[in-house]
Image (cartoon, helix red, strand yellow):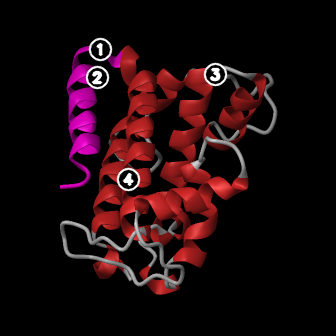
Amino acid sequence: MENDELTNSIENWEDKISHDKDLSAIAIMNIYTKMEKYFTKMFIMYASGEKSSAGYVPRRRLCFEDESHLINFLKLQGGQFIDYMKIIENFTKFIFVINEDPFLLVFSDSKFYNVYKKSKIIRNYVAHESAESKNLYIKDCLCIKKLGETSKFIEPNKYLLGKKKGIEISRFTYFVNEIAQISNVIIDPRKYF
């Protein structure tokens, strides 16, 4: 299936984490990167009119002849780099018929969007360790408005290994389970609409 690389990465990292818990933040960074690659592949495939292995093909409002036509259109923004995640998040609603947009649930379902957003924030913080990425991590993942005596900074590994409220699994396990589910939704979102 189209998500094999992503699901294999998840399984590989789950195995590594079972032996070394200190790898959880690196694992989320890697898994998020695979998810970006998967989203890009599926976006190009669907926007070019191809169907998924489940037979799903969304109707398009903007019809591109093929991958080359789509990429040339996207490059009109200027530059050689195409930020597919930004395009997917902001423009699929204009490319696909609204109730057939395969990415709609990722950005409209609060559970999926929360996992997507927090995974991205952790990935950015682990990859860059910039002040901006740290502040986003503190605000959106740790849910701390201001660090102080009552609230302390928690490194991503410790955060990911902690339990999610109301669920008896680690945040890492919760995130990777949801990412795997998101990847399946994109292959065939019909049962979710």
Looking at the rendered image, the quarter that the C terminus falls into is bottom left
Position of 159 with respect to 50 (left or right) is right
Element assignment for label 1? loop
Q: CA distance from mark 4 to mark 1?
A: 31 Å
Q: Which mark is residue 20?
A: 1
Q: The disc labelled 1 sits on which kind of residue? A: Asp
Q: Residue at x 60, y 38 (%)?
A: 121
Identify the image quadrant of residue 155: top right
Q: Which residue is mark 3?
A: 128
* Residue 2 seen from this side: yes
Q: Nearer the viewer, residue 59 or 68?
A: 68
Q: Which residue is mark 2?
A: 17
Select label 4 or label 3 by which is in front.
Answer: 4
Select label 3 or label 1 by which is in front.
Answer: 3
Q: Which residue is mark 4?
A: 41
Of label 4 and label 2, which has the lower sequence position? 2
Dot 3 and dot 1 residues touching (CB under 8 Å): no
Badge 4 density bin: few <14, some 14–19, many ≥20, Cα 10 Å: some
Q: Position of residue 162 (x, y in %)?
A: 44, 31
